[in-house]
Amino acid sequence: MSNGSTLIGSTSTPAAPVVVAAARGARWQRWLRGDTWVLALAVVYFLALLPVAPDLANPENLQLILSNMLPLLVVALGQMFVLITSGIDLSVTSTIALTSVAGAGTMVWPALGLTGTAAMLAGAVAMLLIAGAVGATNGLAITRLSMPPFMVTLATMMFFSGGAIWATRSNGIPGLPEALATVSQEGFGFVPYALMLVAPFVVGAHVLLTKSVFGRRLFAVGRNAKAARVSGVPVARTVFTAYVLCAAFAAVGAFLYTGRLETGSPVLGQRIFLDVIGAAVIGGVSLFGGKGSVAGVIYGVLFITLVDNSLNILGFSSFAVLMAKGTVILLAALFDAMRARKVAVRA
Amino acid sequence: MACVVGCALGVASCRKKDGRLTVGVAFETLQTEYWVASFDIMHAELERNNIRMLEAISDGDANRQLEQVKSFVARRVDGIIVAPKDAHTVIPMIKAANRAGIPIVIYNRPPAPTKAVSVTIGTDNFGITKNTVEHMCTLARQSPAPAGKKHEALLVMGDLGDINAIGRRDGFDKATADCSDVLEVVSRVPSEWNQEKALAGVTNALQAHPNISFMFTSSDFLLPSIMSALKAAGKWEKAGHANHVILGAFDGDATAYEMLRAGYLDADGVQDAYFQSKLTVQAILDMRAGKPVANVKLDPGLVVNQSNLGTEASRMWGAAVAKQKAEKPQS
């Protein structure tokens, strides 16, 4: 009997553990290639720090983390579109500054005679229009003049940042409508109003990426622009749209940042570029293009906000926080490079 | 164990167990000696009062500073001290502290008019600058410009979005208007609190007006730029030399102290960082105790010049910093 069972199993039993192990390995690799590990990392990080930083789990602090995430999330989602095309938008911080002063200027412009919600909405429209113009400038220079995205957006970063400072002579624009502060800072119970503003953009970005022709074209351009062109993908139009979307999402971020500070500032967002790129890369958006997801960016933003918040709670100086974030982002970029190499070898 | 580790790391939630108060201190920058010295003096003053300090530096980012202040609020600190980036972006921070009933003191840069409640510990920028420039005017009268002409004066301004820079400019304008019989302001250099811009601006001004013989900078941290520009123009000379430019500055840092000692700097308007830190901590304690506290308290400061350096140097925080720097290599 025992022999029989051995015989029966002689063809399958020794191979079974190998097959199971291989399946497990494949599942593990798939998990690593996906986005969920970033969420798991954030949860593990949070739980590991709880004994030494119990304030992390304080409900007020959790609410703070959520509200800190929102403007960064919407800006990082915009950058995601560009990164997927294997481009980069360095001008995103100047777009935030420029739209902040343009929007705030519109809200308090006496000639318009608007107050309250109407003034806020007029400011929001101005911000989106200005952002659209910035994105279109970047997109046209990159697609029509075949200039490298790095150079184009570096130049526009300097130009628009200088423009914001020049237009305001370095001064902030205060006296903004109360409605703007309410939308940006307050909420319904635990849920900030800002979440209701950001949520449609998150859902919209997800639908665009996963359910639309534009999303498929975006990935195709990022993986191989030449092959995409040969296959009939309108590469220039796709890249152009990505830059316009990036700037428009930055304007939404600027709207929230401006409301939080109750001031239009020509230097707003100047120091968040590391966070924007870091959140996207940690969230699995590839710097080499062709890869990215909305869920990944959400997890990346959560992780980077958590690192920031926890290190502040632990009493680390801002310089130590910068070093820690830099290290995390470097590791994420390294992971991305290794993954890209693996894909190249397979191909 | 967690509490021991947490307290060692400065975690606020352990404060109630050891009975010490916890105060969050959020500085916009540690870019210049003044801010570093103020931060250190504040730390020492809080320690002297047996208060634990939580620190946060936002590196010039107003939004980050707001997040840091909200983090202090979430951790229910006993008081908040903010050295803000500007007068407007600090208002949401004050409102957040007000909502939580936490006393908040604004250090060195007063907020714009608002209904939100805070106490400001500031510097009499106008008065200190006016007194400093008046002393320089006295020196100008004692050493008339050649050929019976007026002294040509230059002002290095700060960032005019900063209310402190405006106060210093106005103090300079008032003092120079009062001695317009001996000097004429021929150039105003906007530095935006940037050393490179100051160097470029002063160099250009010296080329356009080679007879400039009277110079005031709105902050000591711009003195190295001014020294470079004056050296390049062959005007970096000690008091008493024919080519000496009557030079005044503001803050009281170690560079200014050394330049005063060496005879290159004629007068320095000094912010008394020790006095301001003392006022700041006392304001937090008084507000917690429900005592009435004035909305604004100004440090009258002092003018340190060549003639009173021996007696007043001890009130100049830069003198202590210079002494520490000198002692460091030996230790």
Image (cartoon, coloured by chain):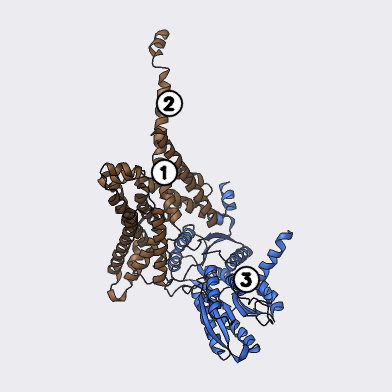
* Residue situated furthest right in the rendering: B330
Q: Is residue B238 left or right of residue A253?
A: right
Q: Which residue is mark 3?
A: B253
Q: Mark 2 and mark 3 in contact (Cβ < 8 Å)?
A: no
Q: Which residue is mark 2?
A: A21
- Which quarter of the rendering shows the N terminus of chain A? top left
- Dominant SS type (magenta): loop
What is the spatial separation of the Cα atoms under label 1 and label 2, in whole angstroms? 25 Å
Q: Which mark is residue A279?
A: none
Q: Which residues are magenta?
A: A86-91
Q: Is residue B297 above or below residue A160?
A: below
Residue B250 at x, y percent in the picture: 59, 75
Give the chain letter for blue: B
Question: Which of labels 3 and 1 is toward the front?
Answer: 3
Give the chain letter for brown: A
| Residue B139 placement: quadrant | bottom right
Q: Is residue A345 above or below residue B282?
A: above
Residue flagged by tag 3: what amino acid is it?
Answer: Asp
